[in-house]
Amino acid sequence: MQLAIIIICVIIVLIILWLISSQRRLVAMDENINNAMSQIGVQLTARFDALTGLLELIKGYDAHESETLLETVRARRTVITANSTAADVAAQENVITDALGKINAVAEQYPALRSAENYKQAMGAVERYEGTLRSARLVYNDSVTKLNRAIRMFPTSLIAGMLHFSAREYLKTEQEKTARPEMK
């Protein structure tokens, strides 16, 4: 009789420990995703700053186009935070891609602009931030994979459902993004 009670208590304690461990693991994965999204926000902000600097540089060549682009970028820009979604990131990347396409069109009209050292440096900065942003997206998608896999696997799926953990959306690269504007 006492042995049966001890065995039942041990089983209950093991189940409770497993529940706590599963919850902590899910929380850690969720926080990794939030951190990765915040990093993407930081990289997008840096890229927007580099883009703004590039637009300021263009003012000397085509003030009207530069001002129009600056106003458009500032109006369409939103800050990416830990709570942002993959769609929010995609929208901000589209703003940057559109602006870069228009900057390249202006640069085509002004060969002196394209050959200016400041322009080359600013364009290089935009490219470097794209590289770090790409790395941040990889970290985010890897973190999402880990959480989504854990949520879908039994018996963790039971805990995830009870604690309202849901699958996260991946950041996707659209076909037109892979053929991004040429940086000259």
Image (cartoon, grey):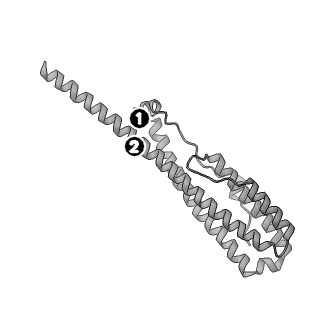
Give the foreground label among 1 and 2: 2
Q: Which residue is rendered at x = 53% and y = 39% of the image?
A: 167
Name which of mark 1 and mark 2 comes first in the sequence.
2
Q: Position of residue 25 (x, y in %)?
A: 39, 43
Q: Is residue 174 visible?
A: no
Choose between 71 and 30: the one closer to the eye.
Answer: 71
Report if the CB atoms under discs 1 and 2 are less than 8 Å apart: yes
Q: Residue at x 61, y 46 (%)?
A: 85
Instruction: Describe the element under mark 1 as helix, strand or loop.
Output: helix
- Within 10 Å of disc 1 (Cα), the crowding (few <14, some 14-19, many 20+) is some
Q: Residue furthest left?
A: 2
Q: Quadrant of the N terminus?
A: top left
Left/right of residue 63 with respect to residue 31 in the rendered view: right
Residue 156 found in image quarter: top left
Residue 137 appears left or right of 87? left
Q: Residue 132 at x, y = what percent?
A: 57, 64
* Figure quadrant of residue 121: bottom right
The residue labelled by disc 1 is 156
Q: Is residue 50 above or below residue 98?
A: below
Work out how far the residue at label 1 is from the one at label 2, CA to CA, in angstroms.
10 Å
Q: Is residue 72 visible?
A: yes
Amino acid type of the residue tagged 1 in the rendering: Thr
Determine which residue is flagged by label 2.
25
Q: How far across and how far down the image is residue 175, in percent?
A: 70, 52
